[in-house]
Image (cartoon, coloured by chain):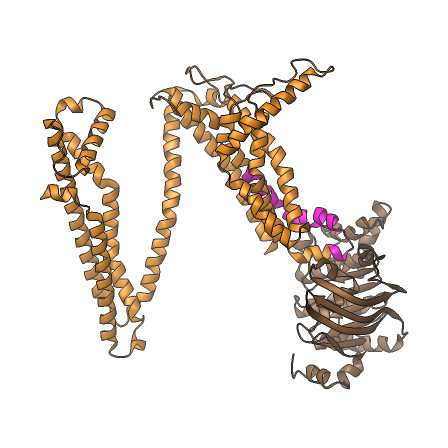
Amino acid sequence: MDGNVEDFVETARNKQALNMAEMTKVDCRHIDVFYDEKQAIYDISMEIQDRAVTAFIGPSGCGKSTFLRCINRMNDTIESASVKGQIIMDGADINDPSIDPVLLRSRVGMVFQKPNPFPKSIYDNIAYGPRIHGLAAGKSELDEIVESSLRKAGLWEEVKDRLAAPGTSLSGGQQQRLCIARAIAVSPEVILMDEPCSALDPIATARIEELIDELRERYCIVIVTHSMQQAARVSQRTAFFHLGKLVEYGDTERIFTNPEDSRTQDYITGRFG
Amino acid sequence: MLETFGHLPVSWLLFAVLAAAGFVAFFIGRTSAVATAQGSTARLNSQPNYHGYFLAMATIAPAAVILILYSLFGESMVRSQLASELPQRIRDLGTMEMGQYIDRIAENSQRGPGSTTGNALFDAATGRYTSLLGLSRIIAIGLALFGAGVGFFFARRRLSVNFRARARVEDGIKLMLFLCAAIAILTTLGIVASLFFEALRFFARVPVLSFIFGTEWNAQTGADFGAIPLFFGTFMIAFLAMLVAAPIGLLSAIYLSEYASPRFRSIVKPILELLAGIPTVVYGFFALQFVAPLVRSFAVWVNSLPFTPDTLLAAQPTSALAAGLVMGIMIIPFVSSLSDDVINAVPQTLRDGAYAMGATKSETVKQVVMPAALPGVIAALLLAVSRAIGETMIVVMAAGQRAQISPDPTSDLTTITVQIVALLTGDTEFDSAKTLSAFALGFVLFIVTLLFNLIALRVVQKYREKYE
């Protein structure tokens, strides 16, 4: 890693200023989520911008991860969860019965809290998505996808000589970048990240944040984080959740310097949460 | 006096006395600790209770050791003493008959005083036995009480403000737990050793190589001891059983752990495990009465087909296939229950990762969950194989007795376990090669199943390193 974090944040800010083409990628309208009888999300509506990083912050149990999982319908895999409301992506409601969640998830990738490489080689971890979705016509094309995904995730130089080694043999930070590369490999439009750095040390975290900033140019990224500094460093827009409700949503700069809601103010200044 | 002791049920009394001694020692230890603490127990290295426990342990332990040794060896010492005192004509009878004679004496002695038979020699021997027993008991009790006293005395002297009674009690508990574990291991070693030495006696009569590589087995006539046909039968039936159990067990485990709703799972899993609780003799009965005739009529039907030779299949009334099928059903729960646990142990994050890539459920299971669970599944299968190899009742009832090497599953085969049963039931003398061969077979069987279990354990260990 070159330079210190402050420099990196500074350049990120500058880039952000140049790149303010506002375009909505995901439009969530009146989302309610229930786990059995218990309501976890109350009527949340928000527009998520394309080619930008949107951070979800809030105290534990505030529903930010649950809301994130609505965007690729991962809540379908939880028996007791039910989602109400519309999530419009490219003009179609993803909760519509005609939408295949399996195909949706190839458009909306996800990176999890704990690195979860598959019990396969590094190569096969990346090739997994392209293979199941038939994205590569032949071996050479697949090789290309693997290489470019690993390059985009900044992992290629570290692993190019041991692509056949198991994914679990990498360090924690490398594993998380492998998971990001895996998500990129199916060319998604949106990448959801659920506390991607919470299991990593500060250096690996800085590496991932740098990567997120690079990826912002191509993807719509949503990141859930417990670290306010991280939200401030990597995101352009920030949403503050509290008790299943969206309290405040706006430009990161404004949320952190001049929050409108007193709860946001209290959370950001560390008075609760 | 001695005879009275020989008749008394002293053991309970002794337990009561020891327990009382333990209590007394506990209170003495406690009280003296409180006294030495001079009002402030915080000054003590260990709390008064620990002083009490320590003293009680030191009192009971030596006595318990002596009594356990006595209960293990006391009676046989009495018997050998009695044997040496019996008249020459009885001692000439031989070990076995004399043993039975002394058994009768011991039995008579237990009936209590005055149970005479009229046979002067026998009654005298009974009386002698009873007094010898009484003497041995008095010695044992004396030694035990002495041991308890010595233990108490030395332990009492060690108690002081700085004595680390808590650590000593911890050591004592550790030792006790170790001894319990050691008993299980020693028993296993004892069984293996007895098998091994009997097997050695067999191999003194029949060369090892002709046993392991011989292809003829006629143990009942004592002519041929070639174990190959038995191994063939054993592995053939185990293979047939795995052919049934592996796919059904594995697929049902996948269904239960990945697809079934929690409600369905909570009902079906115990039912499936109930299969493991059915006595094997019931399975054997089922195999003999129901499956074997079915297999036979199937074989007859195949033979009657126009394009097959009439003697293609053996179509025996008992068959390897019948035994294998039923055994397969029996070991389904072993496979399914163990694999279900292993599959459940695969972290949910891996599944989420695959779903988030847009994988379907079956793709996730096939390409992510199963590879992750594979080592554990292999271990489950190996345990099931060793179970199938060692299974006895089903094959005794449904596999047949003929030692032959035949790839035809409808022919009757015999297995190692069947032969062991056949060799050791009925009138046997424990000196012939025929009987001893059962121990050799048992020993080899033990080695084989041990190997399978060891491999399974190693595989499981490797798996554990991966996900924790």
The spot of residue A197 in percent (x, y) is 69, 67
Which residues are drawn in magenta?
B355-384
Magenta span contains residue A253: no
Numbered disc total: 0
Q: Residue at x 69, y 81 (%)?
A: A267
- Residue B127 in the figure: left or right of residue B32: left
Q: Residue at x 58, y 29 (%)?
A: B324
Specify whether residue B356 is in view. Answer: yes
Rendered view: B96 above or below B13: above
Quarter location, residue B176: bottom left
Q: Quadrant of residue A61?
A: bottom right
Frontmost residue, B153 versus A239: A239
Q: Please, is residue B467 above or below residue B104 in the view?
A: below
* Outermost residue toward the top in this view: B310
Figure quadrant of the C terminus of chain B: bottom right
Q: Quadrant of residue A113?
A: bottom right
| Quadrant of the image containing the N terminus of chain B | top left
Instruction: Decide whether residue B363 is among the magenta residues.
Output: yes
The location of residue A62, given as percent across then percent down, is 69, 73
Q: Residue at the location (54% across, 30% down)?
A: B286
Q: Which chain is brown?
A: A
The chain that appears orange in the image is B
